Image: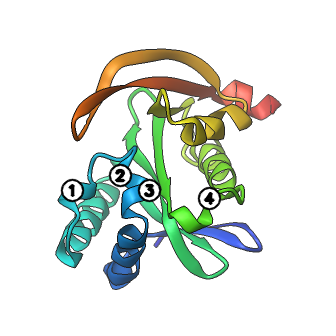
Amino acid sequence: MFYHKIDEELSLKLIELKDAEKVFALTESSRDYLREWLPWLDFTTKLEDTKAFIRNSLKGYAEGESLTTFIVYQNEIVGTASYNNLDRSNKIAYIGYWLGEDYQGKGIMTRVAGALTDYAINELNMNKVDIRAAAQNQKSRAVPEQLGFVQEGSVRQAEWLYDHYVDHVIYGMLADEWKKA
């Protein structure tokens, strides 16, 4: 089982079915807030949807294609962070994340993304870490910017959010750049 302690108040743990109710409750309490930037909220309307997500994520982990974790802050699950895709042939880890509304502004996600970047490069021997965010999502974009990621470009109309497309900004960190940071 994957467990990664980041600091005294923050850690990442492999998602588990036993936590489905807590994560679904967190999703419910932050639904309107998260819906602005996450396309899956309308497809996660009952506990069984969260359980199906967890099962699918565990399958990806077992196959070595992804790693989805729950973010644990002061002993509470406050969001998720993942390698949405581990491209082992090109040695690229693609990070994605979301955080409950009540936990914003505490530096949690920057620490989490930094820990995932470090783990990808130093433990999984990835050459690059990729983070993508909607162009107008300033909070999500601030995470890779604070960590020194390079803005590499954008993809027009990269994601459909309920009734409109959003462009994505792509950030990258190379292994040799991270070692210098």
Element at label 3: helix
Q: Is residue 147 visible?
A: no
Q: Earlier in the sequence, mark 2 or mark 4?
A: 2
Crowding at label 3, few (<14), some or many (≥20) Cα neighbours within 10 Å? Answer: some
Q: Which residue is mark 1?
A: 42
Residue 12 appearing in the image: yes
Residue at the spot 71% in from the left edge and 60% down from the top edge: 106
Look at mark 4 in the image and give the residue it sits on: 104
Work out whether mark 1 precedes mark 2 in sequence or the reverse, and give the earlier one.
2
Which secondary structure lies at badge 1? helix
12 sits to left or right of 93: right
How far apart marks 2 and 4 lie (CA) works out to 15 Å
- In the rendered structure, which amino acid carries the disc numbered 3? Tyr
CB atoms of marks 1 and 2 within 8 Å: yes
Q: Residues at badges 2 and 3 in contact (C-beta under 8 Å)?
A: yes
Q: Which residue is mark 3?
A: 33
Residue 96 position, x and y percent, is 45, 46
- Location of mark 2 (residue): 35
Observer-nearest residue: 24 or 173?
24
Mark positioned earlier in the residue sequence (3 or 4): 3
How many angstroms separate mark 3 from mark 1 (CA)?
A: 13 Å
Query: Which label lies toward us, 3 or 4?
Result: 3
